[in-house]
Image (spheres, grey):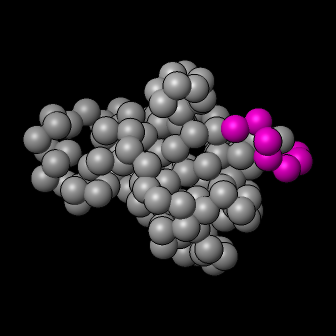
């Protein structure tokens, strides 16, 4: 997979202010505020910054958290996980492996078969129906 590297000025021009805050500054949208949280359509979820295919709707579930949640990415190499020690806690941040944009966090409290909950910001994703 080709990596995308843009200057911060280019990212600011490409993204909305809200997208820039989440994708490039590791911000978080409010729970239940995202347009994709309740989306049940069949399709693919891509990185809103670069279009990288990240999640399949078959792996999406209602976690009750207020953010789109998935049991796994399309393939492990599509995302990159990093330790996040912000806000006085240790979590695992999930970034797009192609452009290094912040997507959300992954938690070990999801359903089978993986036991993982990829809790993603709706604004960080672009949905493509099948």
Residue 60 location, quadrant: bottom right
Kindly identify the residue that appears in the image at 85 percent across and 50 percent down: 111
Position above or below: 27 against 84: below
| 4 vs 85, nearest the viewer | 85
Q: Which residue shows up at 31% across the image and 55% down it?
A: 19
| Horizontal side, residue 126 vs residue 112: left or right | left
Q: Does the magenta stretch include residue 98?
A: no
Which of the two residues, 83 or 75, is positioned nearer the viewer here? 83
Residue furthest to the right: 112
- Count of labels shown? 0
Q: In this view, does 16 lie to the left or right of 130?
A: left
> Residue 124 at what x, y percent from top left?
42, 54
User: Would you identify the image quadrant in which residue 27 lies?
Assistant: top left
Q: Which residue sits at x=16%, y=37%?
A: 8
Across and down, in percent, residue 115 comes to 83, 41
List the single residue furthest toward the front: 88
Bounds of the magenta span?
107-114
In which quadrant is the C terminus drawn? bottom right
Residue 112 belongs to the span the image colors magenta: yes
Q: Is residue 87 above or below residue 129?
A: above
Residue 128 seen in this snapshot: no
Q: Which secondary structure dominates the residues rendered in magenta?
A: loop
Point 66% across, 57% down: residue: 65
């Amino acid at each position: 997979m080709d990596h995308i590297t843009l200057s911060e000025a280019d990212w600011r021009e490409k993204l909305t202010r809200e997208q820039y805050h989440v994708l490039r500054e590791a911000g978080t949208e409010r729970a239940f505020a995202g347009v994709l949280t309740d989306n049940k359509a069949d399709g693919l979820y891509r990185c809103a910054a670069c279009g990288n295919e990240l999640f399949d709707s078959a792996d999406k579930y209602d976690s009750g958290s207020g953010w789109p949640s998935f049991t796994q990415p399309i393939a492990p190499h599509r995302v990159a996980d990093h330790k996040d020690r912000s806000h006085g806690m240790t979590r695992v941040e999930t970034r797009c492996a192609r452009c290094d944009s912040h997507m959300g966090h992954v938690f070990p409290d999801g359903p089978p078969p993986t036991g993982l909950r990829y809790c993603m910001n709706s604004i960080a994703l672009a949905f493509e129906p099948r």
